[in-house]
Amino acid sequence: MKFGTGLAAVIVSAAAVFTVGASPADAAAGGSGPYPADYETSSSLVNHTVYRPSALPSERLPVFVWGNGGCAANGTGQINFLREISSYGFLVIASGAPNGSGSTTSSMLTQSIDWAVAENARPGSKYYGRLDTSKVAVGGWSCGGLEAYAVSGDSRVTTTLIFSSGLLNDGDDYQLRRLTKPIAYFIGGPSDIAYPNAMDDWGKLPSALPAFMGNLNVGHGGTYDQTNGGEFGRVAVLYLKWRLKGDLTAGANFVGSDCGLCHSQWQVQQKNLTLGDGTPSSPSPSPSSSPSPSPSSSPSGNPGCTAAYTVQNQWNGGFVAGVVVTAGSTALNGWRVTLALPGGATITSVWNAVNTGTTGTVTMANQSYNGQLAPGQAAGFGFQGTGTGGGASVTCSAGG
């Protein structure tokens, strides 16, 4: 179930907010990569901003097209972040002119891909034969993430990156069902207003789709305006080096139970990922580490499984909570959690579980993709509600 009202309000009203970052005071000229980068415009691609290494390297540049936060037509709105990516040998094209105004559409991302393909093939272009147009990524932040979803089905797209975004309505879920290429989510944790929708999308991805989910508890604003785009910039570079350049050292940050980001401040989930050796990672619908808030109740359940409940965020009138289910000494072929909510609390949206009831005593059963757990393996689900989340109790039983 989507939780769209608050997120829609942020997306609709965000253009004016996100343009504040047009000329961040701490912009790091060139980025931290081996190819110092800057931006330019082209008369053949109006209302776009092109980031490229100042001196084109001998290696061909993969292409990354970007939709801005708030769908703002300001191609320098996330300049630190985008220039950082380009400095590692990528052609990056953002919708909107430098310091531009107005709004963008998903068709502008398609225009960016079209232009890169045409320039790579045009004799006399500085990019003639210098781009790797077989490796194209599409990404976006917030409203820009919705634009990225819209063009992810383009046959030229290699992978999709969704930053602090999620589909607003269940009627848009067809965009998830049609995904066939790897996807990665980089979300701002439970305090990110897009978190419930992103997690809802995660739970509805095609069962065999390679997917990564990373949550960093920085909220909806991310780290784009920090020097070199901050942590989001660092991780985006690693992901693109892996997916578009075949860098397996970079890919090791995302794959397997011992992945690089698994041992960091990121909370990681994986589905169907391979590093290149043909061995898929095990599905891990729960975060690799528990959220920082203390559990509101102790783990409880029968010998088949235990459940631990955590209030991840509480505000005046609402909360986000998570439950981690852990298999006991035998494998599970399904699980069910009984949740006793405190008085006055009502569940409004759920991800990674199927609920029966929304108030009082509620049951949560596994989804089709997270019910089978090996001994000691964990799965997680979450929900958003009104009222107060503290004081709930949980019990776990084997069987769906």
Image (tube, grey):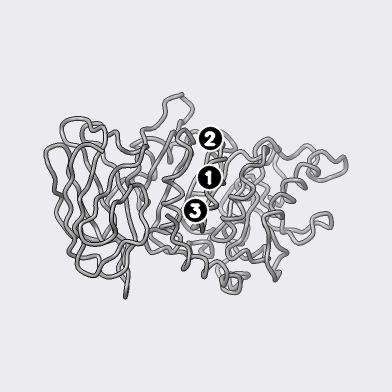
- The residue wearing badge 1 is 176
In this view, 110 is above or below 391: above
Q: Left of 133 or right of it: where is 397?
A: left
The three-letter amino acid code for the residue at tag 1 is Leu
Residue wearing tag 3:
170
Residue 275's x, y, as percent? 46, 31
Residue 226: x percent and y percent? Answer: 51, 64
Q: Which residue is mark 2?
A: 247
Q: Marks 1 and 3, Cα distance to the nearest angstrom?
A: 10 Å
Q: CA distance from mark 2 to mark 3?
A: 36 Å
Q: Residues within 10 Å of mark 1 (few under 14, many from 20)?
A: some
Label 2: few (<14), some (14–19) or many (≥20) C-alpha neighbours in 10 Å: some
Disc 1 vs disc 3: which is toward the camera?
Answer: 3
The location of residue 42, given as percent across then percent down, is 80, 56
* Residue pictured at 49% horizontal, 27% vertical: 276
Marks 1 and 2 sit apart, C-alpha to C-alpha, by: 27 Å
Tag count: 3
Residue at x 62% of width, y 63% of height = 71
Disc 2 secondary structure class = loop
Q: Are marks 1 and 2 in contact (CB under 8 Å)?
A: no
The kind of secondary structure element at disc 3 is helix
Amino acid type, label 3: Asp
